[in-house]
Image (cartoon, grey):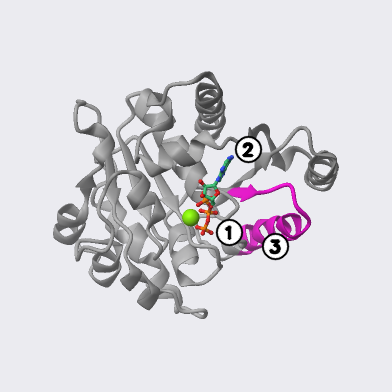
Amino acid sequence: MSSLKGGVGKTTVTLGLASAAFALHLRTLVVDMDPQGDATTGLGVEHGTNQSIAEVLRDPRASTVETVITPSGWTQDSVDVVDVIPGSPLAVNFDEPHPKARDLWRLEEALAHVEADYDIVFIDCPPSLNALTQTAWTASDQVLIVSEPGLFSVAAAARALRAVADANAERRDGELRAAGIVINRFRPQSIEHQYRVSEIRDMFGDQVMDVQLPERSSIQQVQGAARPVHMWPGEATQDMAHLFDRLLRNLLTHS
Ligand SMILES: Nc1ncnc2c1ncn2[C@@H]1O[C@H](COP(=O)(O)OP(=O)(O)OP(=O)(O)O)[C@@H](O)[C@H]1O
Ligand SMILES: [Mg+2]
């Protein structure tokens, strides 16, 4: 999950998709590349321990990755697997603006040791295009761009799409794909939002995902409680869970 703008919902979408994968009993790994560690917190894992993504990036060997991977708090009473590579403030040390190409392979190298253990891996990115995001993209097949229906978010989404295309051009395998733009925090009552959504759809055409995520305050309660959205009561929240199911299905059909 990427965007060049902060606070648009990357972590919310990461957690929603992880919850959808959990509901499907997929063996799921979430990698928290953001030094803020919000995804880690939302998965019920302590953030800021010395077992984190920072160790993995420093030393991408199998023994390190295997030690750092932690079961999420979501799966305590379950046989299903939702694991986490926790975020850490120390990850800022790996976020240079102009990284060397060989350093961008560290996550890819680390995940190669454990990929057979998982059906799907989600990576939550920080809101920039520095080394951490580029490292995440190097390890990925698809990038999902998250945007709010606002003026600056639209411009940021356009830049992100271009950046994914550039990153793919640099990749030997040519296998990095922009999965598309998902619009988050849509308020159907808002004239401004309606206008921005039609603008985004005009500009980006079928690169915009059909699924549109509404503004729902319960999502913040779900995250505060560090629970999967699929296990939260209430009709409005379950509607949101179904949207994440659809979004996941869409991503899986292209993988
Ligand atoms: N659809 C939504 N409805 C209501 N609140 C939302 C929604 N999406 C996100 N939020 C809230 O907005 C805030 C920012 O969302 P989130 O943390 O997912 O964004 P982000 O892109 O990961 O931010 P950052 O760039 O800081 O990592 C959070 O408090 C989150 O709970
Ligand atoms: Mg975030």
Tell me what residue is drawn at x 49 percent, y 65 percent.
134
Q: Is residue 234 magenta?
A: no
Residue 73 is left or right of residue 127, and the answer is: left
Which residue bears the numbered disc 2?
215
**CB of mark 2 within 8 Å of CB of mark 1?**
no
Kindly give the residue lying farthest to the top in the view shown. 235
Report the front residue among 182 and 204: 182
Residue 224 seen in render: yes
Q: Where is mark 1, residue-wise? A: 168
Q: CA distance from mark 1 to mark 3?
A: 14 Å
Nearer the camera: disc 1 or disc 3: 3
Callout 2: CB less than 8 Å from ligand 1: yes
Going from N to C along the chain, the mark reached first, 2 or 1, is: 1
Left or right, 209 with reference to 221:
right
Indicate the secondary structure of the residue bearing disc 2.
loop
Residue at screen point 56% across, 24% down:
236
**Residue type, numbered disc 2:** Glu
Please give the residue where the numbered disc 3 appears in the rendered image.
159
Q: Which residues are magenta?
A: 145-166
**Which mark sits nearer the N-terminus, 1 or 3?**
3
Residue 213 versus residue 93 in the image, above or below: above
